[in-house]
Amino acid sequence: MKEITVEELKSMKEKGEDFQLIDVREDFEYQMSNLDGENIPLGGILIETDKISKDKPVVVMCRSGKRSAMAIMQLEQQGFTNLYNLQGGILAWADQVDPTISVY
């Protein structure tokens, strides 16, 4: 499984790179704090594959990196090859990039 760090994601955002960010946390978690990605909770990821790009990098994130890894394993079985797991999830983002973001 390919992974990227929060520093790499921050750089991609700052450079305006063309990528998609998918947040697989539950809606209530996403409402509390998010990085402006598209919210597709893990439980519905296979139902909503049509919302996930196949022709540009897709960064998948959650709270700590575990649910996003599960989502990537499921999606790779569906033929996706352009997925990157955000190491440490939003907890790492809060710790290393933006300490003002709400975490739980």
Image (tube, rainbow, N blue to C red):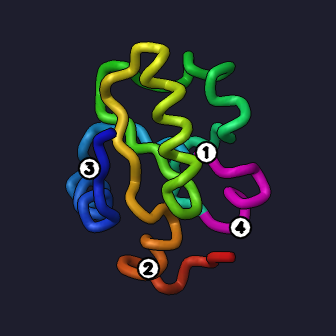
Disc 4 to disc 2, C-alpha distance? 15 Å
The reply to whether callout 4 and callout 3 are in contact (CB within 8 Å) is no
Q: Which quarter of the figure has residue 40? A: top right
How many tags in the picture?
4
Q: Looking at the picture, which amino acid does disc 3 mark?
A: Gly
Q: Looking at the picture, which amino acid does disc 2 mark?
A: Asp
User: What residue is shown with label 2?
Assistant: 98
Q: What are the residue bounds of the magenta stretch?
A: 24-33
Which residue appears at 54% of the width and 40% of the height? Answer: 70
Please tell me whether mark 2 or mark 3 is closer to you in this view. Answer: 2
User: What residue is shown with label 3?
Assistant: 16
The reply to whether callout 3 and callout 1 are in contact (CB within 8 Å) is no
Disc 2 to disc 3, C-alpha distance? 18 Å
Vertical arrangement, residue 52 with respect to residue 10, above or below:
above
Vertical arrangement, residue 83 with respect to residue 15, above or below:
above
Which residue appears at 37% of the width and 19% of the height? Answer: 54
Please tell me the numbered disc located at residue 32.
4
Please tell me whether mark 4 or mark 3 is closer to you in this view. Answer: 4
Precedes in sequence: disc 2 or disc 3: 3
Q: Main secondary structure of the magenta part?
A: helix
Precedes in sequence: disc 3 or disc 1: 3
Question: Is residue 86 one of those drawn in magenta?
Answer: no
Disc 4 to disc 1, C-alpha distance? 14 Å
Disc 3 to disc 1, C-alpha distance? 22 Å
Please tell me the numbered disc located at residue 53.
none
Disc 4 to disc 3, C-alpha distance? 25 Å
The reply to whether callout 4 and callout 2 are in contact (CB within 8 Å) is no
Of residues 76 and 102, the one drawn nearer to the viewer in this rendering: 76
Precedes in sequence: disc 4 or disc 2: 4
User: What residue is shown with label 1?
Assistant: 24
- State the quadrant of the C terminus: bottom right
Precedes in sequence: disc 4 or disc 3: 3
